[in-house]
Amino acid sequence: MKVLIVGAGGREHALAWKIVQSPLVEHVYVAPGNAGTAQEDCVENIDIRSDDLTKLADFAQLKNIGLTIVGPEKPLVDGIVDLFLSRNLKIFGPTQAASQLEGSKEFSKAFLVRNQIPTAKYESFSSAEKAIQYIQENGTPIVIKANGLAAGKGVVIADNMLEAKEAINDMLERKRFGEASRKIVIEEFLEGEEASFIVMVDGKNILPMATSQDYKRAGDGDIGPNTGGMGACSPAAVITPELHQRIIDEIISPTVKKMADEGNPYSGFLYAGLMISKTGALNVVEFNCRFGDPEAQPVLFRMKSDLAAHCLAAINGQLHRESADWEARNSVGVVLASKGYPEKYKTGSQVTGISGDQKQTDNGLIFHAGTTLTDNVIRTSGGRVFCITALGNSQDEARLKAYELLKQVECDNLFCRKDIGLRKDKVRKSVTEV
Ligand code: AMP
Ligand code: GLY
């Protein structure tokens, strides 16, 4: 079978790297891919953008693609699954209607509240005046979110009224995110530890992926602006077996059931971003309609079972027959990003030190994200450039191995956080100690 992976990031490199190992898969195309996918055996980049849905569907038809997996949210929210299904092409992902769980915060918040699935108290607004009145009544800290997709930048945690007003005016008056911030959602600030709970869904049945945790802030000690994620580890130590079952019973199963009951059956990866309080209270912070990035890198690095078989079973509504098998060791992925990310950064810097045919070793693997390969030269082309991922007998061992491997990458325009894989409580402690 030929597989098409849509996207160009580290998650897509991990998906391609993993799925090409399946005995069911002969060749993988990545649209448009990066320097990492360009160098994998039996994997080929094709020059089609991930948001050019018609060209992607034409390509899938022409090449007789047996399975398409979509990495980023935009093509899903734009309806790539509906288009592929209308042409009888096999694709694993949610329809446009079901992707609203990520594409519209208003949709997902209303869905959660209507179905008594725990989430922060909220209201949505299109008037700045009413929004400001609401925060005056509710106080700070408070969280202000653009309703639509804003490339991970549409969330402001306001610590005081000034910041809150600024964020509201920025989104509603100055239309910072265009159509995505024509409406905003304002919600209660939740305290606790975050974890990513990602499952595969076939409309009805679920197959949980290994748990993971993302490091969202740009700076060590969880400070600085939010990013797409500066690193991740798997499993998430905060999710005990008991909590794992509660997450399925209280959040994942009701979500899948209610989406189907309400006429929007969900199929694809479903990512629940959770807040877990000290007392064990669970809340949904967000849903994503796709695998996480960088969570995919450490999670798929631990997957021992056949991803292609899981996806095909899901497409056929047979996920209950599948079981996923995981490497017992911990994994940690550390992102190397362009200096300046998530704000302004330059691209086009040359990367040396990693050979063209870099392969997995027992120490780990360098997943590429924002890279290009021209005439055998690797150059940076995005904000997040690599995710160096390693296994260890403990999270500490995995993190040390990842940072050791990271030293191979030579480029003068990259930075990373130094505390990826440190337990979050230790991260916070180190900040207060400094
Ligand atoms: P979102 O795009 O909704 O996932 O928000 C991005 C990040 O902002 C989350 O991963 C959290 O770190 C933070 N965040 C979002 N909503 C809340 C909330 N209600 N309370 C605390 N932190 C939040
Ligand atoms: N790492 C967070 C996300 O993929 O949305």
Image (tube, helix red, strand yellow):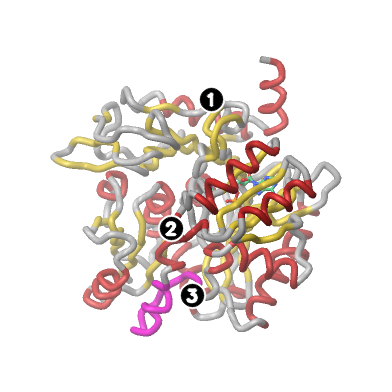
Q: Position of residue 184 (x, y in %)?
A: 60, 57
Q: At numbered mark 2, what does the secondary structure look like: helix, strand or loop? A: loop
- The span shown in magenta is 79-94
Magenta stretch contains residue 394: no
Question: Could you tell me if residue 3 is visible in this image?
Answer: yes
From what the image shows, is residue 64 above or below residue 424? below
397 left or right of 389? right
Q: Amino acid at mark 3?
A: Thr
From what the image shows, is residue 277 above or below residue 2? above
Residue identifier under label 1: 418
Give the alpha-carbon distance from disc 2 to disc 1, as whole Å. 27 Å
207 left or right of 113? left
From what the image shows, is residue 295 above or below residue 341? below
Q: Nearer the viewer, mark 2 or mark 1?
A: 2
48 left or right of 146? left
Q: Quadrant of residue 332?
A: top right
Q: Which is nearer the N-term, disc 2 or disc 3?
A: 2
Q: Decide: few, some or many residues near mark 3? Use Cα within 10 Å; few <14, some 14-19, many ≥20.
A: many
Q: Nearer the viewer, residue 113 or 58?
A: 113
Q: Amino acid at mark 1?
A: Lys
Any mark on residue 72, and which?
A: 2
Any mark on residue 95, and which?
A: 3
Q: Nearer the viewer, residue 192 or 308?
A: 192
Residue at 28% from the left image edge and 59% from the top image edge: 49
